[in-house]
Amino acid sequence: MTDAQGKGAVLPVSKDPGDAILEFLRLAVAKELADAVILPMKVPSGDSFAWILMNDVSLFEGAVPIAAAMPVQGAKALRSLTRKGPGNLTVIAVMRPCEIRAAIELEKLGQVHTDNLILATYDCPGAIPLQKYVDDPGGSEEHFSLMRRSGKPDNTAKPVCHYCENFSMFDSDLHFGYFGFSEKEVLVIPGSDKGSELLKGLDLDLAKDLSDWKKGIDSLKAEREEARKSAFEETGEQLRGFSGMQSVFASCIGCHNCQSACPICYCRLCYFDSETAQQDPDALITAAAKRGGVSLPEDRIMFHVGRMTHMSLSCVSCGQCTDACPVSIPVAGVFSYVADRTQRTFEYEAGRNDGDPLPLRQFRKSELPGIHELVKNAESEEPSHE
Amino acid sequence: MSSIIIDTSASRGVTGLLKFLLESGKIDAALTMRNDPENNTYDFGLITDASNLDEAVPLIPVMTVNAGQVLSSISISRKKIAAVLKPCELRAFVELVKREKGSLENLLTISYTCGGVFPLDTVITGQIKELLPKYRKTILNGEIPVNTRDTCRACEHFIPMNADITVSVIGECEPGVGCVMHLNTERAVEFTEGFGGERSDRKFDPSTLKKTLDARLAEKEKLFASVTKDGPGLDRLLDTFGKCVGCHGCSSVCPICYCLLCDFESANFDYNLPYFEEHLSRKGALRLPPDTIFFHLGRLTHMSFSCVGCGMCSDVCPVDIPVAAMFKKTGEKTAALFDYLPGRDVEESIPVMVYKEEEFPDIG
């Protein structure tokens, strides 16, 4: 973060913060400071949004920068655009903080190239679950606009949003802050050299002191931390022991939708969908005979544990997995709970752009001393071969 | 062929048969749906020990996974398996066998006249408990139960095609008071030898189910009209599939879509920046990720001949696109062009695998 000077530029608001952001983007493209933008736009049926890459300024009007729902995680849109390299287009993407954080994780995994992207975030009040939005777009919009004004997710918001602490500026190039200004103005805060340069190019002075805005954000953050504590306590209780895990995932049908909606799970062919994971049918029946029977499709819980092992260090708790689950399993609640612990274990926070490599890519001579202790104890309990 | 009449409910009759088959060593395992009352969920059990059949609910009108998909990997085994399948699951499995993704060789297939299944949502919300008692009465009257999957309501193929054993669930007997099993094959006769019940030479008579058939056909007409009510064209496709989030859940639960890696998820559909630049300069805007509609059209091209209209795709769609109705309608039309009916006969080749010197002269 380079808002060290603690100042931001001010954009006037005519209708809502989204309009101010659109006007800002129009100027940036008109002044050729960017070639194109990526924004959500309503789909033709009006009950959802899609990511649109656009350079035709006349089309911007139909865009909704701060959309009530998150049908496709933004990092996936950025991945489809830059997976094969950064290209020559300078593109501004306006997304939720969890989407930009996922994009930063994907960059560490070589799936996104941000060289020519300007990543912009905004104060996020939370998102409405996709199914709810599709069922009732009008009602959802009403709820969302109240959430936007208060900065607080209401009971219609996704469960994980209630306890998300990273709802405001994170490691983005640019941040639009508007919580606490009654939607009368939007602050533009640079978060990197790229962001600063863009503001300079638009002749926007960093005239406004940020301390009031920050105070507001901090108090919202404190509320969410409280919510987080109680949510995690509850999840921890539910997950106790294998039977806990089994009962949370009991209705899983093995469709792997959680994985395909996940921005971090980028593998084309998940190990659990591969031939390697398919058990030989004779062996399966032999295994079934040992227990009197097996549940099919096999390894439905193993899949979730495996996915957790693979991606929880990069999980940004965006909640897309829960949205995509056809049998309403609170996947995100579980994954967020586990990610909180795995990331703290490695003193890592997913979505940070501070040069820290992914924990599994880093060799430390000494780490997790507790584990050595465990191994030592186990060794001493082994029978001696002497 | 003959039949067996047992003085018990159809469900208990089938469970009893599975028990007999396991205990007498005629099969190594039985595939049936089970209920976990503690968590209020259903799953498929591959059961080897007859004492574990207590949780079996072989005829429950719920489809968590299309059994054709489940059987695909386990049927290629030397072990003998008896499987209880819904008619569309058996049809899907037959389509997979044609693609060498399964084998009927060591399988005893037990299917039944199907009243349709309830969407997964009704299981999750527990609503199914209230729906079930009424369901049985409704199907007995030859009517369509409320709240079942839209493609089930419009399904005319509710009588199993080429099952070894057909159990009467709609028609023939009051539910709960009698079980009639029709033995359609030599294999069925051989496997049921020594199993109790009264033997009869009663034949399965589809004409008794005419009321159900008429109701389903009327429902199908309505359903098919609803998916194209706004007319043809790309714009209409956009109206329907525009909110697709690209999760491809429809393809992963589709029993026919057996590819481990769908082409649309492969590197073939990764684009270089110039692709996006070209689209931008031509149209000024482009959706990310691209190919939303293309995916559905591609999938239709690949599998619609074999679509059995099971409705799994609609059930898992997170944005409630009527995928199954669209695919069933398209599938029926494409299959009809080739006088093909998926699941009818394992010897019948998939239309794209057949070479005819002369076909579709109009196209030329």
Image (cartoon, helix red, strand yellow):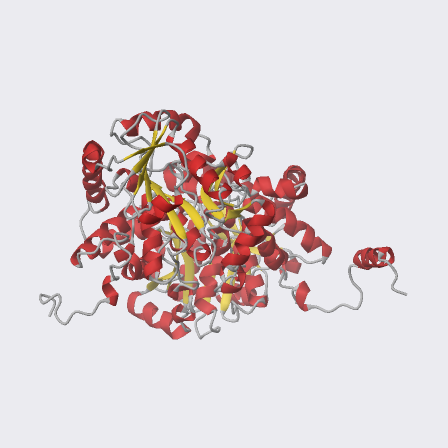
B285 sits left or right of B17 in the view: left
B134 sits left or right of B34 in the view: left
**Residue A311 x/y as whole percent:** 59, 58
B288 sits left or right of A363 in the view: left
| Nearest the eye: B137 or A269 | B137
| Nearest the eye: A77 or A313 | A313
**Residue A280 x/y as whole percent:** 52, 60
Could you tell me if residue B297 is visible in this image? yes
Seen at 12% across and 67% down, the residue is: B363
Image quadrant where one finds the N terminus of chain A:
bottom right
Image quadrant where one finds the C terminus of chain A:
bottom right
Vertical side of B185 occupied by A314: above or below: below
Seen at 48% across and 74% down, the residue is: A85
| Nearest the eye: A232 or B181 | B181
**Residue B214 x/y as whole percent:** 18, 35
Count the labels in the image. 0
Farthest residue toward the right?
A386
Vertical side of B158 occupied by A95: above or below: below
| Nearest the eye: B276 or A16 | B276
Could you tell me if residue A170 is visible in this image? no
Farthest residue toward the left?
B362
Vertical side of B102 occupied by A181: above or below: above
**Residue A17 x/y as whole percent:** 46, 48
